Amino acid sequence: MSLGESDSPTLADVEAVVRENVSGHVDGDRHEQGKQQLLAAIRHRRPGVARAARRVLLGAAVLGALAGGGAYVWKQHNSVRLTYDVAGGLLSDSGYVRGSGPSGARLSFSDGSRVDLQDGARARIAAVDAHGARLAIENGHASLNVAHLPRAAWYVDAGPFVIQVTGTQFEVDWSNYDDTLSVDLHEGTLLVSGPPAPTGVLLRAGQRLTAHEGRLSIEALEQAVQVLDAPATLPALEPLPDLEPALGAPAPAEPAADDANAARAPRPEAATAPQRKSSR
């Protein structure tokens, strides 16, 4: 189609011109503006204005391509998977982490998240991507502080249980000897799923979840801590008898047995010396 062939150009004609002269992505508002300018130029048979309109559309196409390229670079930047390092522990090639000292091991991730493994705990880094990681607690106690970021996605496996994390602070303890799970949530929310709750149970800040032998219970974390920290109750003792005399004048002392007998015995009369008879 050539400009000026019709006094009543249609939108299809304009779109055909755009398709012939513009390639790539064009912002919707700029595209519509350019089409309206082109329609006006065609109606008034002003080729110069039409050429200007085409330049506007071409400029919009270039800007759209640059914007698309920038979005692609941003997406690529955000798709870089997280990195991490281990302090105080050993990391095997298969992703197993184990503490090498009495203070346990710490995993520090590039998004600011931390995982502290207690001494003797065993864990495995199953997967890492741009939005989080998947950890498997084989046995023992771990404290996690997951950074609250957009699109964060973390998972913790503990036996048959899966803990879904978006950004929170919590502790998890898993015993593979008696298949007991304990989760203490300090901040945020968690979704815990497992055999007692296959669709998941929502855990809120300040709650403790315990699962054992197919039973699952949730209680207030503060109450649970108070129960654990309360000292053993001692039985009440009977009051001791009052061995002290009543206050007041002191009681007279009882005389000794020999002294009492001596006081009751009659006193012997004084012996009279025999008189001598004098002889004259």
Image (cartoon, rainbow, N blue to C red):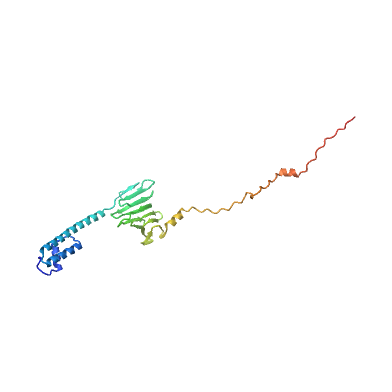
The answer to whether 258 is drawn above or below residue 173 in the figure is above
Q: Residue 235 at what x, y percent from top left?
A: 54, 54
Q: Look at the image and tell me in which quarter the N terminus lies.
A: bottom left
Q: Is residue 243 left or right of residue 171?
A: right
- Please report the residue visible at 33 percent of the width from the left and 50 percent of the height from the top: 107
Left or right: residue 135 versus residue 31 is right
- Residue 196, how many percent across, how many down? 39, 61
In the image, residue 267 lies at what x, y percent?
A: 78, 42
Total count of labels: 0
- Residue 160 seen in the current view: no
Residue at left offset 45%, top offset 55%: 226
- The quarter of the rendered structure image containing the C terminus is top right
Give the image location of residue 71, x and y in percent: 22, 57
Write down the quadrant of residue 43 in the picture: bottom left
Residue lying at the far bottom in this picture: please name it: 8
Residue 33 visible? The answer is yes
104 or 35, which is in the foreground?
35
User: Residue at the right extreme?
Assistant: 280
**272 or 43, nearer to the observer:** 43
Of 249 and 201, which appears nearest the observer?
249
Residue at the image point whose x is 72% and y is 43% from the top: 259
| Quarter of the rendering containing residue 39 | bottom left
Q: Is residue 52 left or right of residue 116?
A: left
